[in-house]
Amino acid sequence: MDTVEVTPKVIKMTPKLSFGTSVRDWQEGINISRLRDERAARARKIMRKHGVAALVASEPPSVRYLTGLRVAPLHQTTYVLFFADDPDPVVFAHAGWYQQMPEDAPWIKKWRVARAWFAGIAGPGATSDETKKFASEIHQELADRGLTKEKIATIAIDGMGQEALRKAGLTVIEGWPMMMEMRTIKTQDEITCFRMVASMCGAAYQRLHENLRPGITDIDANRIAINSLYDLGADAVWVATRSGPMSFERAFYSTGRIIEHGELLYVNMCRTQFLGYSACIYRTFVVGRQPSGKEVGMYNRLRDRLDSVIDAIRPGNTTADAAKHFPPAKSWGYKDEAEVFTVEFAHGIGLHELYDPPIVSRHCSFDHPQPFEPGMVIAVESMDGEHRVGGVRLENMLVVTETGVEMLDSFPRDKILVAGTC
């Protein structure tokens, strides 16, 4: 029996931006200096809370969070020594970038060339020599500040590097949990970056909506959105289209598959970035016709489910309060909640393509709930449909406020979007 449309709940939207991506002397937009300074101040506060004097980080999003530098995504070729009580970190820069970066990033005062051993591919002798130099130079910087007896945390420094630091006499602990704590609550300018990337994605969805039609491929659809996002000023772009039998669950994309008349498809723009801050958005389309009653019913269930999850995201609640509104894995015929983990859940978003806390999922939230706090930015996603037949997906980006949430993405989400009709 056909399912009639229902009126969706009204969700509060974040205020519209009054500026674009260009820098102007006559209008305040994103304050870049404040963005860098407030992230660094939060990092130092959390390091002091945990009794950590210094942090050695090589993973690009962590380096960017701590310093504002965008670095090459190569294995430990750039790392930063960041201090809890010294405002000037030491950046050990990739040999291919070392000569150029100081002129382009004058807010960093102290530069050294990085020691890179590329996970040992130069052989054990070269690796041993390089890791000793790495540890010796870190030790010297710490000695200059009287910190060699303090706790030192590392992020994405491999086992060989950590062992070399310990052999140099340093007390080394894992720094990733602390970095996650730093990144959980976003600053004013970080939230504005999310508002901007959500606006860009909305504009790209509009361009796609206008040009989707039967007969183009999923790669053609990606290209339409990708070109739009680059035109709008995104600094990294990721678009994935899944159509027809590939539009339920989540598997291969960009296959070159031809989109046929009457098919459902969904498009995600997750990992598209502005100033490093990632979007995480899905929208569903049908091409060449109106959706059937069955498809409308699937989408209404999906949207209403997300609305219930969104209603539960507020200070005073935990991720367990929100997770109960997701259906159990058995609803899809699965045996284990792990089978819908990362497909039917909510997650924090942050710099680059990484998830940030918290996680909302039946897989882990009931046993390990996390509190919702103002300043968290969270994406909520789910699905409905039939395996190898087709389905619908939706994902929205939210910022947690003192009283609930505001939605960051404003492109229509109340129903399946119809494209390519004559």
Image (cartoon, rainbow, N blue to C red):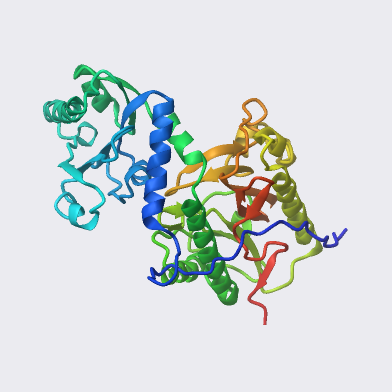
Give whichever of 385, 148 is nearer the camera: 148
Extreme residue in the bottom direction: 422
Residue beneath the point at 60% across and 43% down: 374
What is the total number of numbered labels drawn onto the structure image? Answer: 0
Asked whether, in this view, residue 251 is left or right of residue 329, the answer is left
- Can residue 386 be seen here? The reply is no
Q: Dividing the picture into quarters, in which one does residue 164 lie?
A: top left
Question: Which is more toward the observer, 130 or 255?
Answer: 130
Answer above or below: position of 322 versus 173. Answer: below
Q: Is residue 61 left or right of residue 368?
A: left
Q: Nearer the viewer, residue 374 or 183?
A: 374
Which residue is at a point 48% across and 57% down the rendered structure image?
Answer: 193
In the image, what residue occupies the spot 21% across and 28% down? 145
Vertical order, 96 against 41 (above or below): below
Identified at 39% across, 61% down, the residue is 235
* Residue 86 in the image, given as x and y percentages of width and height: 28, 35
Tell me the quadrant of the picture where the N terminus can be found.
bottom right
Does the image show residue 227?
yes
Query: Is 212 rendered above or below residue 131?
Result: below
Percent of width and height locating residue 268: 55, 57
* Residue 160 x/y as whole percent: 24, 25
Which residue occupies the foreground of this view, 260 or 116? 116
Q: Which quarter of the figure is the C terminus placed in?
A: bottom right
Q: Is residue 314 left or right of residue 235?
A: right
